[in-house]
Image: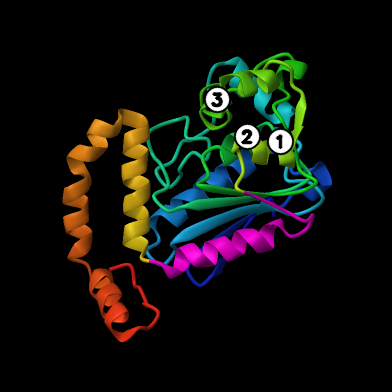
């Protein structure tokens, strides 16, 4: 297998599993990731996703021999079915409504950076090396880094690495705000799972509403988010989870949410 799907209660784990090729992304792997994102989005019992990789590196980049014809023809990523969500968030407006947490290590090059830019929380092992290598291979990034990386780390920081193809470290990434935690090597998944369990322990309707409103503000501006926020609050406050949250507060116990 190249993409393995596992579950732990309300958490979906998406494992990149092609270590013999440094997890270089093929079209088949892309499609499996797209289907995993769709499954996470649609399954009411899944509340958060964790993306991580098997082997010494998260990824060395794309398997260029498998992608060059598609890119040279201007096709882009092969998103063709309704039961898929593009992990690069490039091919249409579909987004996974559930939060995604990335745990990276070793090489995290090209597509690894670009899909991570769409994650909501990012954890990196201390040995992680990031890079956008495309200009060293003769072309340029086409999975979102040209317009998303600057939003996360600033224009000049982004251009510093996009225009040179140079690598940057986990500490650099943390300093620039690209990642939220740096762990000991080998501990990145453990930290990501700790965070995922925290997210899965709180009200899932509230979590999804946070993402929905924050993304609306990012895409269309604060005024668009303001116009709908109170209708969304009213909808969530009518939920069973809201009643459970209030009751747990009265009873001084941990709330048990159901996503209803």
Q: State the image quarter where residue 108 is shown.
A: top right
Distance of mark 3 from mark 1, alpha carbons? 14 Å
**Is residue 203 left or right of 106 when viewed as pictured?**
left
Q: Which mark is residue 204?
A: none
Quarter of the picture holding the C terminus:
bottom left
Which residue is the site of mark 1?
Answer: 172
Whether pointer 2 and pointer 1 mark residues with C-beta atoms closer than 8 Å, the reply is yes
Distance of mark 2 from mark 1, alpha carbons? 6 Å
The reply to whether residue 24 is visible in this rendering is: no
**Is residue 61 left or right of 122 when viewed as pictured?**
right
Residue at (32% x, 35% y) in the render: 217
Distance of mark 3 from mark 2, alpha carbons? 10 Å
The percent coordinates of residue 180 (x first, y second) are 60, 47
Which mark sits nearer the N-terminus, 3 or 2?
A: 3
Query: What residue range appears in magenta?
Result: 181-202
Compare residues 67 and 226 and report the one nearer the observer.
Answer: 226
In magenta segment, residue 29: no
Which residue is the site of mark 3?
Answer: 150
Residue positioned most to the bottom: 251
The percent coordinates of residue 245 (x first, y second) are 30, 73
Residue at (46% x, 66% y) in the render: 200
| Mark 3 neighbour class, 10 Å CA radius: few under 14, some 14 to 19, many 20 or more | some
The percent coordinates of residue 92 (x first, y second) are 40, 32
**Is residue 195 left or right of 250 when viewed as pictured?**
right
The percent coordinates of residue 214 (x first, y second) are 36, 42
Quarter of the picture holding the N terminus:
bottom right
The mark lying in front, picked from 3 and 1, is 1
In magenta segment, residue 186: yes
Which residue is the site of mark 2?
Answer: 176
Most frequent secondary structure within the magenta stretch: helix
């Amino acid at each position: 297998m190249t993409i393995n799907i596992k579950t732990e209660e309300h958490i979906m784990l998406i494992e990149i599993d092609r270590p013999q090729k440094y997890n270089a992304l093929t079209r088949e792997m892309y499609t499996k990731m797209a289907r995993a994102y769709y499954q996470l989005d649609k399954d009411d019992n899944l509340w958060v996703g964790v993306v991580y990789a098997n082997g010494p590196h998260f990824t060395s980049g794309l398997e260029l021999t498998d992608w060059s014809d598609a890119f040279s023809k201007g096709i882009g990523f092969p998103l063709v079915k309704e039961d898929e969500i593009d992990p690069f968030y490039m091919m249409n407006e579909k987004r996974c409504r559930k939060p995604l947490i990335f745990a990276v290590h070793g090489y995290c090059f090209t597509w690894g950076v670009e899909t991570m830019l769409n994650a909501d929380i990012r954890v990196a092992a201390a040995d992680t090396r990031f890079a956008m290598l495309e200009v060293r291979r003769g072309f340029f990034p086409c999975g979102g880094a040209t317009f998303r990386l600057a939003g996360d780390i600033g224009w000049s920081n982004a251009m510093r690495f996009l225009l040179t193809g140079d690598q940057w470290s986990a500490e650099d990434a943390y300093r620039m705000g690209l990642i939220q935690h740096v762990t000991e090597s080998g501990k990145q998944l453990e930290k990501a799972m700790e965070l995922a369990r925290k997210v899965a322990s709180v009200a899932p309707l509230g979590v999804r509403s946070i993402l929905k409103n924050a993304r609306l503000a990012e895409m269309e501006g604060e005024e668009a988010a303001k116009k709908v926020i109170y209708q969304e609050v009213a909808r969530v406050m009518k939920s069973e989870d809201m009643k459970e949250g209030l009751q747990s507060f009265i009873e001084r116990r941990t709330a048990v949410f159901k996503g209803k």
